[in-house]
Image (cartoon, rainbow, N blue to C red):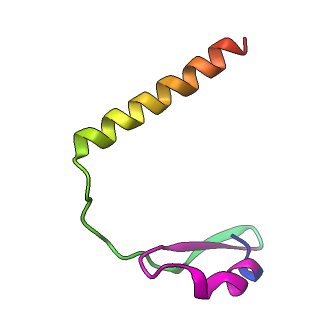
Amino acid sequence: MPIDLYNEVKDTIAKEIGVYVLNGEDFYCIKNPIKKKLGTNTDVLIYSLIKSLSREHDKVMKGR
């Protein structure tokens, strides 16, 4: 996000969320995220990702 926007919203960003800002043409990390153990089974996440990708693929194919 642009540095000006970060300065406006930095107090509302949760402590575990990391932030990259754009400075000219370069991105840099201004706030590091806090690692946290996943609350969901990895298999469920993988299944959800595959399902989402399949849905997006179907949208693209219908648009042809």
Residue at 59% across / 82% down in the picture?
Answer: 12
Image vertical order of residue 59 relative to residue 31, above or below:
above
The magenta stretch is 5-23
- Magenta segment: does it hold 4? no
Q: Residue at x 45, y 78 (%)?
A: 32
**In the image, is residue 64 above or below residue 15?**
above
Say if the magenta span includes residue 21.
yes
List x then y, in percent, for residue 45: 32, 43
Q: Image quadrant for the N terminus?
A: bottom right
Left or right, 27 with reference to 37: right
User: 45 above or below 7?
Assistant: above
Relative side of 21 to 51, left or right: right
Q: Residue at x 68, y 80 (%)?
A: 6
Quadrant the C terminus occupies = top right
Q: Which residue corresponds to the image point at 77% horizontal and 73% vertical from the top-left? A: 24
How many circles with numbers are drawn on the protein? 0
10 is higher (above) or lower (below) than 47: below
Of residues 15 and 28, the one drawn nearer to the viewer in this rendering: 15
Q: Residue 38 placed where, x, y %? A: 26, 59
Of residues 47 and 22, which is closer to you in this image?
A: 47
Horizontal and vertical percent position of residue 50: 40, 30
